[in-house]
DNA sequence: CTTTTTAGCGAACAACTGTACGCCGAATTT
DNA sequence: AAATTCGGCGTACAGTTGTTCGCTAAAAAG
């Protein structure tokens, strides 16, 4: 019951995960990693890999899950920081950019496999993104009094823009990133403004006789 | 001077291009195509491939260029249709969705290699997208009297949203696509509204004493 | 007609790949 | 103390890859 065996197993499992992460780079996609290389980097025999994962895919999905988890945790922190006051948009952009800076490889993995050739990967990543959207839509609906439909659309547009810009920021020197962030904030503000403007026209055309 | 030789060469060049295209699918990325498979599909010896392209990369870049060209041509057609009246946004969305429907493989190639591992691919595709943005920004500035900065930002946001939604539409049954298109149109309208709203606040805070 | 150019071929090579199989030895269970 | 579980290893195999080299035959150039 000491679990000395389980402990060791978990250790080399981590070694495999880290080996995979360490081999990812702008020039090397996860989908082109070989089981043998990863095993070599983790200092185990190729055949031992199978004691931990059935596939390279299974390893990759683990990375996706862990990355998504990290992102969601950051979002919660963001909501807390927000209680102290400050622009939601600016804070969210900050958090997001920090995330991709500190998790370049994982974010690249998310981007690449989001449009990759494995349906399982695509679905797993789409699920993570959907999480992101839903939380934002809820916030817009509850805290900003937007009707559900409009909140959903605004969140959708914002998340799309944010991820797309994140992809561009990924291989940008830190110096250029500040500029991009200002653009990002403006674009997101644009979307927010547009949403409330649309809300106004809808409620106007719907119940113009009803002031309350 | 008959050029019977040049003619034949062009023919098998096309055969190679078509072979590559025909092997692309949701399950097969361009970056994982093998020179040998492509040559086999084109009915030439593997070694003959080099008479036409130095690399598989060179072949891929050709596909990117051709895809970009097609897209730009459609844009011009779109601008013509626009002269007859109608919603710019709706028409543009129509055209875009048509494009990805009729060029699934190419669009998938663009998406995948946009965040792929070859810098040359990334740059080539970024260039195509930049074309798209610039043309839209010019239109917004010239025809819609938006200040250049705001036009640039609106175009940027719109193109990002459009491409992102395009990626989702790619593996969607045609039945679900209609719904997605309506969402797209609303999101783009949101962005457009937001841009003019921001314009109003800026000019108000800048020169409130200047009516003209 | 003679010479040069060139698209295409086949053989060969070394480098990898994923994975099936059976064995070992230490941790765990009985 | 004996039996079982199981993480890890080495060997082995068949398959595929990109690319080099020298050759052929037909088109083009002289």
Image (cartoon, coloured by chain):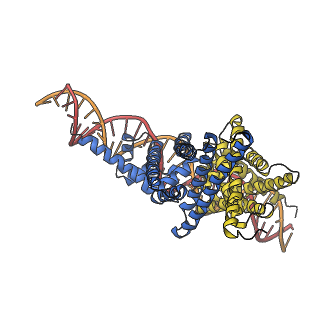
Chain colours: A blue, B yellow, C red, D orange
Q: List x then y, in percent, for residue A211.
A: 69, 42
Relative to D16, is B85 on the left or the right?
right
* Residue at image location 54% in from the left, 63% down from the top: A171
Would you say A155 lies left or right of A47 here? right
The x, y position of residue B124, in whole percent, is 66, 61
Q: Is residue D25 above or below residue B103?
A: below
Percent position (x, y) of residue A147?
Answer: 62, 41
Whether residue B133 is visible here, answered yes or no, is: yes
Visible residue check, residue B41: no
Give the quarter of the figure containing the N terminus of chain A: top left
Residue at image position (67%, 43%) is B170
Q: Quadrant of the C terminus of chain A?
A: top right
Residue B176, above or below A18: above
Q: Position of residue A83 (x, y in %)?
A: 45, 52
* Numbered disc total: 0
What is the quadrant of residue B201 in the picture? Answer: bottom right
Q: What's the residue at 74%, 56% (across, down)?
A: B66
Give the residue displayed 48% in from the left and 51% down from the top: A33
């Amino acid at each position: 019951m000491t679990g000395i065996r389980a402990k060791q197993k978990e250790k080399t499992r981590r070694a495999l995960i880290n080996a995979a992460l360490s081999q990812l780079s702008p020039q090397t996609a996860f989908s082109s990693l070989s089981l043998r290389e990863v095993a070599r980097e983790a200092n185990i025999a190729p055949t031992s890999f199978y004691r931990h994962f059935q596939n390279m895919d299974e390893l990759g999905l683990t990375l996706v899950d862990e990355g998504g988890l990290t992102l969601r945790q950051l979002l919660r922190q963001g909501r807390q920081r927000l209680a102290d006051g400050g622009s939601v948009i600016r804070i969210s952009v900050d958090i997001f950019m920090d995330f991709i800076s500190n998790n370049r490889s994982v974010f690249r993995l998310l981007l690449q496999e989001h449009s990759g050739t494995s349906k399982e990967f695509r679905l797993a990543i789409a699920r993570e993104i959907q999480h992101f959207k839903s939380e934002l839509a809820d916030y817009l609906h509850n805290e900003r009094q937007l009707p559900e439909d409009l909140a959903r659309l605004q969140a959708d547009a914002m998340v799309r823009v944010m991820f797309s810009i994140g992809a561009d920021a990924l291989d940008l020197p830190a110096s250029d990133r500040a500029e991009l962030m200002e653009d990002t904030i403006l674009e997101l503000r644009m979307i927010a403004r547009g949403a409330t403007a649309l809300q106004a026209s809808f409620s106007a055309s719907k119940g113009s006789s009803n002031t309350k």
